[in-house]
Amino acid sequence: MLRLKTRYYKDKTTLFASPRAGEAGERSEPGEGFFNTPLLTLQANSSTPHPLLVLRTISDLSRTGRGKEADCGKTKLYPLSCWHWTYVRRLHVHLWKYLMRIAITLSLVAFLAPFASAQKNIGFDKAVKKFDVTFEPAQAKPGETVTLKITLDLNEGYYTYPTVQPEKSAANMVNKIVFPAPGALIFVGETTDPKNAKSKAEPLMGIDEMRYYTGTVVFERHAVVSPNAKPGATTVTLPNVLLSVCDKDNCFPAKKLMPEAVFKVLDGPAVPVQKAYATEVNKLLNK
């Protein structure tokens, strides 16, 4: 039978496994007998070891059949304080039961995730009549400026947010639109929110002015056709569009979209980039 014990020194604490000697009640100290191999040494000034390090030690002893009980009189498995390890084998069984519960829980979460996602999108799909992303104009020469329009057509009774709220306390009530890195088209400037915003106060949230939109909502951002773009059709994908919609009672979880818009680069020599965006375009091209 193997007994786990600790020996405290000035600057370290060592966990030993030592054989039990003689009759019941007799104890063999570390250094007395056949087995005198330190299992774990903890320096006094060292950072706290991960608890799994201690559990791994106990588990290994159990599996090899060399440990069955631990004395909690002097044995303190730092940093787990003084756990009462009555039977190491029992600990091993409980540990595996615990890990199996975790595995089953994770499996259920993975299995139910698609259903939860479907439920989450019901509010958005019910609120949105039409969602569209287009370029205007849909074709241009290299160097010319076009506009990307993201159109959200809401059913009656629903509203959505801008991409920026003027009041700091309402900063989380926004839609998020992430644009792609420069390619055939180079996005410049900032996203423009519609100008027909409504506003209301939310006293319970400490908000004096929260802006929102109803009906047809159009977000815009300018893009310059890269002077280096090759002629022909290209598809631009927005990698992350998070849109939130609400009704008078609830705000539904934001739906993540990755919309695409088709654009055609016309053949012909590049024209000078519009002065307002020339510096930004040159900086992005030379990045």
Image: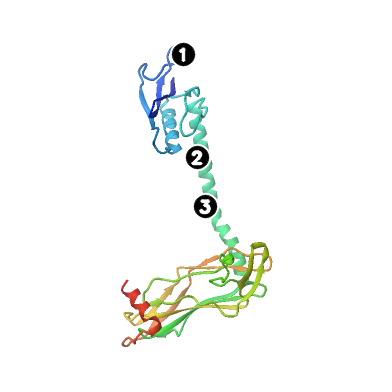
Q: How many marks?
A: 3
- Mark 1 vs mark 2: in front: 1
Residue 166 position (above or below residue 91): below
To which quarter of the image does residue 265 belong? bottom left
Q: Amino acid at mark 1?
A: Glu
The x, y position of residue 217, in whole percent, is 57, 77
What's the mark number on residue 99? 2
Q: Amino acid at mark 3?
A: Ala
Read off the residue under disc 3: 110
Q: Amino acid at mark 2?
A: Leu
Read off the residue under disc 1: 26
* Render colour scheme: rainbow
SS label for mark 3 = helix
Alpha-carbon distance for marks 3 and 1? 52 Å
Left or right, 202 with respect to 173, comes to right
To which quarter of the image does residue 280 belong? bottom left
Left or right, 97 with respect to 206, comes to left
Q: What residue is shown at x 31% (from left), y 87% (from top)?
A: 269
Q: Going from the N terminus, do you reach mark 2 or mark 3 first?
A: 2
Q: Nearer the viewer, residue 26 or 96?
A: 26
SS label for mark 2 = helix
Alpha-carbon distance for marks 1 and 2? 35 Å
Q: Going from the N terminus, do you reach mark 1 or mark 2 first?
A: 1
Q: Nearer the viewer, residue 278 or 19?
A: 278
Q: Are marks 1 and 2 in contact (CB under 8 Å)?
A: no
- Mark 3 vs mark 1: in front: 1
Label 3: few (<14), some (14–19) or many (≥20) C-alpha neighbours in 10 Å: few
On-image quarter of the C terminus: bottom left
